[in-house]
Image (cartoon, coloured by chain):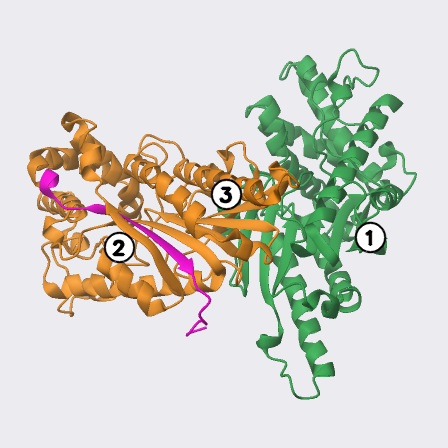
Chain colours: A orange, B green
Amino acid sequence: MEITSMNGGDNQYSYVKYSLLQRIGVDSSKVMIEEAIADKLDIQDLKNSFETFRIADFGCSVGPDTFIAVHNIIQALDLKYNSRYHQTAGGLVSSDNTTTPEYHVSFSDNTFNDFNTLFASLPERKYLVSGVPGSFYNRLFPRDSLHFVHTSFALHFLSGVPKEVVDINSPAWNKGRIHYTNAPNEVVAAYTAQHAVDMKAFLCARAQEIVCGGLMVMLIPAIPDGTSPSLSHPGILSDLLGSCLMDMAKMGLVDEDKVDLFNLPVYSTSPKEVKDAVENNGCFSIERMETTLVPPSVMDIGASNIAEIYNDHVRAVGEGIIKEYFGNDITEKLFELYPKKLADSLSILASGKSSLLFVLLKRTKLPLQNE
Amino acid sequence: MEITSMNGGDNQYSYVKYSLLQRIGVDSSKVMIEEAIADKLDIQDLKNSFETFRIADFGCSVGPDTFIAVHNIIQALDLKYNSRYHQTAGGLVSSDNTTTPEYHVSFSDNTFNDFNTLFASLPERKYLVSGVPGSFYNRLFPRDSLHFVHTSFALHFLSGVPKEVVDINSPAWNKGRIHYTNAPNEVVAAYTAQHAVDMKAFLCARAQEIVCGGLMVMLIPAIPDGTSPSLSHPGILSDLLGSCLMDMAKMGLVDEDKVDLFNLPVYSTSPKEVKDAVENNGCFSIERMETTLVPPSVMDIGASNIAEIYNDHVRAVGEGIIKEYFGNDITEKLFELYPKKLADSLSILASGKSSLLFVLLKRTKLPLQNE
């Protein structure tokens, strides 16, 4: 089931306008992408296998972040191809565009992503384009067809809510909450297991799609190893949203049973979990893995706006899921209560741990185990 | 400029519901597509160059015709691959799915096509999917990347209205009409020249995209060689629509100057023009070219409904263009007048000439002249 689409179009709370945190992530990874392409991409090795250099962004949403990321990637590739010919051709091969391959970029997201908005806002470009609808937990591209994969602020979305947490007869039934923050161990375990299954599926699909020697950059909202959900920044944000819904249930504005059965299909992974998943998959080498902290940069914007910024962020990302489940009527009230709750919790939010995990993988030449 | 998008969504006059003529075309070409793949596709020859068999439909609109065409193509390919292994493997290679390649299908149409509707209605399938936005008069796919191309009811749309016909100072200024039916020779010549330029661009782009040995099926609404526009079926339909607009101008419902500057970017080609364009391009051999007559089949549906059917057809195809130019206000009245005008002209319509041109091209191994 594909349930996670960002708000489309360009209305007030659209993802286009409120992807501030994502933008910071894309900007902060620019240098790391440049270094990845400069240092880790062996174009000599790839050369025989293509005339077209194929790039894919998984979880592209509607732009413009995806266009910025693609621009950064292609700029780094141009530099690589041109400098290579400068260095090796001894004046015989010029460094003009004829030395760079033709670029093909695929923008991929769930089937119900607003591809119309994405296509209508495509920038002037020197690459060919396609849109690829479908869940990235499945195969979406032909075998051995991608040379560079990018995915940013997307892998924290699970393929769906773990079944156990909406099963009244399960010890993992998540009554009175919409996430695993401050929940019984069984709930946390169900989310953790779902994430492990999903990461396995994601890596298995990409291992088939990416050519040997191809690179994959993953930018994942995460938490430091060993952080309790209740002390994590995304955990606190989810918990406060859940408590607003429970407040609304007490006010009679929404059915409490319905809130009990609603859960966010989102999980904050950790460096160790990602490392384990990659090692278990066995088709990729970890070329670089590091964390950058996001909240301080956001804090720099000014504390007075912070509740509003988080509200807009959560609304842009979560409103679609909430509307789909609860209908259209509750979101105005919900996102009237939420910023107040956020404003009352600024000190907790400020101390909440969170990080942005940058991972660079290279498709190795090892045979696939489960192909 | 991309100005030709079908009505999207699934409202009353959407393309989905009123593409009856197109459906007849797709159905009537089923057997010819099967024969093309059975007799003209040399999979032994293609085999070395791919593990993925890449199909593209240009001018896909929002479905379901494109899904039916793709289904027909893949069914014929499956048959080809399986029977080949039956015949040659002597029992050593089974004819199960492992003998067929992985299929990848690209649905392509103008940037403002409703891809959201297309993606949401994708059928259960055994092929990978992408959507490719952009005018097919430009390059849209990587070099040597397509094995089978299909385009149906799309090539009669020009890349735009010829400049001269909206230039008041040109002898080709098309005052009082919206098309070249019953127009001065200069107007007809401007449309004819635009079509020649567009066909050249289309074939040049596809020649680069299609692998040597790859096939292209084109299903084009056309008229027999030497038919005067005023005796052609699409010419009569356009002329009657134009006369409705002029009637509305006389009633003061629309500005006459505005009608003078409005022209349909549509052209009815002929077998000879297509043959000339292919020969001038020089990269394709014509493997099959034949015409089938559409109007009689439609007439079979029942004369009493025919005005309505044509009205719905023209509305589904043309309403988007008309709204874009005239605004939303005039279409209700226009498509109230049009069926009456059609009903008054049934005998002219019945005698109007028109055909559906089926063309099968094969990408030859000749070097590209203008690459």
In the rendered view, does B90 fall on the left or right side of A258? right
Q: What residue type is disc 2 on?
A: Pro
Q: Residue at x 28, y 61 (%)?
A: A275
**Contact, CB < 8 Å: mark 3 with mark 1?**
no
Q: Residues within 10 Å of mark 1 (few under 14, many from 20)?
A: few
Q: Which residue is drawn at 58% across and 75% down?
A: B97
Q: Mark 2 lies on which chain?
A: A
User: Which quadrant: the C terminus of chain B?
Assistant: top right
Looking at the rendered structure, which numbered label has been put on residue A34?
A: none
In the rendered view, does B278 fall on the left or right side of A292? right
- The residue tagged with tag 3: helix, strand or loop? helix
Question: Between tags 1 and 2, which lies in front?
Answer: 1
Looking at the rendered structure, which numbered label has been put on residue A265?
A: 2
Q: What residue type is disc 3 on?
A: Lys
In the rendered view, does A105 fall on the left or right side of A177? right
Q: What residue type is disc 1 on?
A: Leu
User: Can you give x and y, in whole percent of width and height, for residue B31 in the image?
Assistant: 75, 64
Question: Between tags 3 and 1, which lies in front?
Answer: 3
The Cα atoms of the two marked residues, 2 and 3, are separated by 39 Å
**Can residue A278 be seen by looking at this rendering?**
yes
User: Can you give x and y, in whole percent of width and height, for residue A81 in the image?
Assistant: 54, 43
Which stretch did the figure color magenta? A349-371
Q: Residue at x 54, y 31 (%)?
A: A124
**Dot 2 or dot 3, earlier in sequence:** 3
Q: Which chain carries label 3?
A: A
Q: Is residue A59 above or below residue A368?
A: above
User: Which residue is label 3 attached to?
Assistant: A80
The Cα atoms of the two marked residues, 1 and 2, are separated by 55 Å
**Can residue B184 be seen by looking at this rendering?**
no
Q: Which residue is drawn at 16% across and 44% down?
A: A237
- The residue tagged with tag 2: helix, strand or loop? loop
User: Which residue is label 1 attached to?
Assistant: B366
